[in-house]
Amino acid sequence: MSALTALRDRRLTGLPTRGRTLAYGASAFPANLMAQTFSAFVVFFYVDHLRLPAGWVAGAMVAHGILNALLNPLVGAASDRHRTRWGRRVPWIGLGIVPLVAAFSLVWMPPEVSPAGLLVWFLVVVAVYDVAYVAVVLNTSALFPEIFRTTAERARGNTPRQIFGLVGMILGTAAAPLLYGSPLGWVGMGLVLGALCLAFFVWSLAGMVERPVDEVEVRAREAALPLRDQLRYTFANKAFVTYVLGSLLLQSTTAILLASVPFYVRYVLGGAEADATLVLAPIFVVAIPSIVGWSWVVRKVGPRQALLWSVAAYGVAVGLFMLPGSLPGAMAVAGLVGIGVAGMMQLLEVALGQVIDDDERRTGLRREGMYFGVNGFVVRGSVIVQAVVIAVVLGATGYDAGLAVGAQPETVSTGIRVLMGGVPLAVAGLAWLCFWAYPLRGLDVPPGGAGDAGDLPGAAGDDEPQDAEVLSR
């Protein structure tokens, strides 16, 4: 048997090894590094460095957001239903890595063309980046509840993954300016970060493995449940609806919080722009060890209860941002916020895995791609929520970008305190209510095959609590 054949035919039975768990988790590092670098610096690069009109770049970014949102459910549904000898997910990941890394690097390496040509370059390269990113990252995420089959397994398996992801986010924020500000420039930054991401993705392939299935039986079930019905069942699934609404609200709180930090530092704390890094740093520093703690909590009480605790901790902590008037006080609050952020990072995908398990019990199908895809589509709405909330609050306070700091109305400082703490607290409260209504109350969903029509999502009995005992799958 050749090495390629052995690679193609490998399947996971039983528990993944530590090496495979670590390799799978390593995929979060390049995914978050690229996403953070792109979101933080691409507008600055094309507007300030390349002098492309800001309105053109804004329009291109809107197109990027729409394309990314639409791709998530389309790619998710396609990967669920198209099986190859290599599996459902692994081909998307293996074929998408090189185009993804190449497109990411090319974003920072535009040719010397006219402004119109530069805009075309941006649109084309970012479109390739979007397609490849969704293909790789969505399918990598879809493997998570397949590789790790119980809450305990998922809690342990998600810990290295989220730590890798946090490190990627930190480097995406901190390393990029160091690189493009050095003699390497923007081109060197793109090449260095691209090579680093490629190395981690190649390593992560060792952890990308699927479980064996009865192809004949699964295809028969898919034929009995067409794609249109699958979509209907997905949006009628009470567990998923409460989950995805809560997830959207939490994503919105973090988006509002991050966008508010520069205003908070300048108009409330009276600090320099660089102080924004000092306000954000404690969140990351505290979140890394807290992820381990939340892994222990969810193994003891289950995803729903752990989510209620983490969202409550996050909401109370973020509300405290309304109080400080100094940088040290804001940093202390940020450290408390990091505890809740770690909980959300650790628990959200564990809970989504539970939703997918429940869906399999009802439909007989593993539809990770569909659920992760629809979730990705919905949470993109957090960008819209962020933009609307910030515009409304700043407008109501009388904020004027043309005025100096000391010349702003007194209401501006109060309004930004509310924007930084009060609004995220209120939105987190709504998210808590969503997770309180989440109907899967136990640690794991009981095993079972496809249910009949009355047992599908939305049918009577969905709200009954599950047995709290850990049930083996």
Image: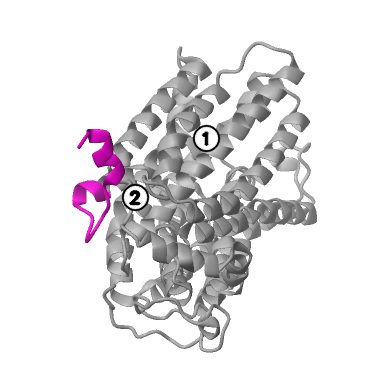
Q: Which mark is residue 274?
A: 1
Q: Is residue 17 magenta?
A: yes
Q: Nearer the viewer, mark 2 or mark 1?
A: 2
Q: Magenta region: which residues? A: 1-21
Residue 125, located in which quarter of the rendered image?
top right
Looking at the image, is 447 positioned above or below residue 412?
below
Looking at the image, is 332 positioned above or below residue 26?
below
Image x and y of residue 472, in percent: 26, 75
Could you tell whether 358 is left or right of 252 in the image?
left
Residue type (three-letter) at the residue carrying disc 2: Arg
Q: Callout 2: few (<14), some (14-19), or many (20+) C-alpha neighbours within 10 Å?
A: many
Quadrant containing the N terminus is top left
User: Label 2 belongs to which residue?
Assistant: 161
Quadrant containing the C terminus is bottom left
Whether residue 286 is visible:
yes
Q: Secondary structure at mark 1?
A: loop
* Depth check, front residue: 64 or 46: 64
Q: Secondary structure at mark 2?
A: helix
Q: Earlier in the sequence, mark 2 or mark 1?
A: 2
Image x and y of residue 263, in percent: 63, 45
